[in-house]
Amino acid sequence: MGLEAALPVDGFMTTQLRRVIGWARRNSLWPMPFATACCGIELMATACSRFDLARFGAEVMRFSPRQSDLLIVAGRISAKMMPVLQHTYAQMPEPKWVISMGACASTGGVFDTYAVVQGCDQFIPVDVYIPGCPPRPEQLIEGVMAIQRLIDEQGLPPPGGKRKPFGIVLQPNFAPRPQPVGLTVS
Ligand code: SF4
């Protein structure tokens, strides 16, 4: 990992405990995938060889909230499903982080109905919002990297206190293109 090259000849290095813990923590995020719809397919693609989330140490999907520290909400959440999501979040040990992946998870998307929650942040704290329908795997990786950067900066969480959600909104990574053929009405 390049550490050996940074070590002096006698093999000792001094640093701060919070930096070592932050370094280990950011490079070993264990996601809890809460995939309810099509965004889940992009989430699966992110872990596959083409995008290879393992490069960032975050490929170990646990499917058990008690072993996870990164909740990825991928897809629309129905009113009936929200208590399950809250329960899952509550079972995860601190410190924990949350990514809201895609338009549906963050805003309800096109499903402006009474049965779909219009943004999961109304019920659980969200650290990173990823736009798009569906978001590309690169965007999810950018979201994971945003959390990694903040873990680096924050170090250890405050003792006994609950962390405030970061509330980062990623920018869309595409620009709308004009119609290839001009539309005319005759
Ligand atoms: S944002 Fe789009 S891709 Fe994602 S769950 Fe909603 S409809 Fe599906």
Image (cartoon, helix red, strand yellow):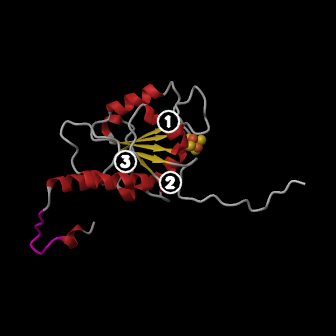
User: 114 left or right of 100?
Assistant: right
Residue type at mark 2 is Pro
Q: Which image quadrant shows ligand 1?
A: top right
* Residue extent of the magenta highlight: 7-14
* Mark 1 crowdedness (10 Å alpha carbons): few <14, some 14-19, many ≥20: some
Measure how far apart labels 2 and 3 are at the Cα level. 16 Å
Mark 2 or 1, nearer chain start: 1
Secondary structure under badge 1? Answer: loop
Q: For residue 67, what is the image quadrant?
A: top left
Residue type at mark 3 is Val
What percent of the width, then of the height, locates residue 3? 22, 67
User: 27 left or right of 78?
Assistant: left
Ligand 1 neighbours mark 2 (CB distance < 8 Å) = no
Location of mark 1 (residue): 119
Q: Residue at x 12, y 75 (%)?
A: 9
Please say whether residue 9 is one of the residues in the magenta stretch: yes
Q: What main secondary structure does the magenta stretch of the protein show?
A: loop
Measure how far apart labels 2 and 1 are at the Cα level. 21 Å
Location of mark 2 (residue): 137
Residue 48: tell me if it is visible.
Answer: no
Q: Residue at x 38, y 31 (%)?
A: 88
Residue type at mark 1 is Gly
The quarter of the picture where the N terminus appears is bottom left
What percent of the width, then of the height, locates residue 186? 90, 54
Image position of 161 with respect to 50: above or below: above
